[in-house]
């Protein structure tokens, strides 16, 4: 069994100072966040998600999420192929399911099912 990747969907940057990062990105891309909470800030950029996640641990770098039909199936297949669980599957709100795995070489790969995702026409 293989995973059908539907395309890139989201990149999330871990940040130590959420307010400063939000101001920097807002200035850089000229767009205000559509989602702005103390636990996450999200920008819509050309139909894709650019997220800021407050954390003191940025050792893994940014997280990129691939769209998949089923996060559970994608994680299961990745684990069968030698990955290890990084962050278990969870509904992060609005029916959006995410999870991350660590590949055998140590990279972190994210999977996302987002029923609201649609590229702009």
Image (spheres, rainbow, N blue to C red):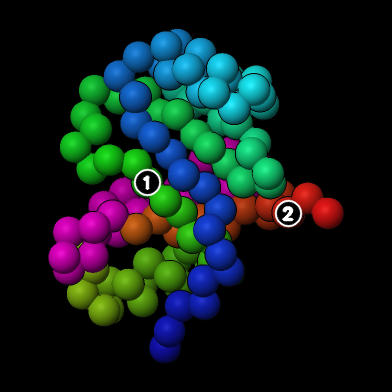
Q: Position of residue 96 (x, y in %)?
A: 58, 48
- Rendered image: mark on residue 119: 2
Question: Which residue is identified by label 1?
Answer: 63
| Nearer-the-camera pick, 94 or 30 | 30
Q: Quadrant of residue 83?
A: bottom left
Q: Magenta span has 107?
A: yes
Q: Position of residue 37 (x, y in %)?
A: 54, 18
Task: Give the residue at x 19% y 37%.
Answer: 59
Q: Quadrant of the C terminus?
A: bottom right
Task: Give the residue at x 46% y 44%.
Answer: 11
Determine crowd level at label 2: few under 14, some 14-19, many 20+ residues with C-alpha closer than 10 A: few
Q: Label 1, secondary structure: give it.
A: strand
Q: Is residue 46 left or right of residue 55?
A: right
Determine crowd level at label 1: few under 14, some 14-19, many 20+ residues with C-alpha closer than 10 A: some
Q: Which residues are magenta?
A: 85-108
Q: Quadrant of residue 77?
A: bottom left
Residue 1 lies, with reference to residue 71, above or below; the image says below
Q: Is residue 47 left or right of residue 62?
A: right
Q: Quadrant of the N terminus?
A: bottom left
Q: Magenta span has 15?
A: no
Residue 63 lies, with reference to residue 16, above or below; the image says below
Q: Is residue 40 visible?
A: yes
| Nearer-the-camera pick, 76 or 23 | 23
Q: Position of residue 36 (x, y in %)?
A: 58, 20
Residue 109 lies, with reference to residue 17, above or below; the image says below
Task: Give the residue at x 34% y 31%.
Answer: 14
Q: Position of residue 60 (x, y in %)?
A: 23, 43
Q: Label 2, secondary structure: give it.
A: loop
| Nearer-the-camera pick, 63 or 116 | 63
């Amino acid at each position: 069994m293989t995973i059908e990747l539907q395309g890139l969907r989201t990149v999330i940057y871990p940040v130590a100072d959420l307010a400063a990062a939000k101001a920097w990105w807002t200035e850089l891309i000229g767009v205000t966040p559509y989602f702005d909470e103390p636990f996450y800030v999200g920008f819509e950029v050309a139909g894709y998600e650019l997220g800021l996640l407050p954390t003191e641990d940025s050792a893994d770098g940014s997280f990129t999420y691939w769209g998949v039909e089923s996060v559970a199936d994608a994680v299961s297949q990745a684990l069968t192929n030698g990955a290890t669980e990084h962050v278990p599957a969870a509904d992060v709100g609005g029916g959006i399911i995410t999870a991350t795995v660590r590949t055998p070489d140590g990279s972190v790969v994210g999977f996302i099912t987002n029923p609201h995702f649609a590229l702009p026409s």
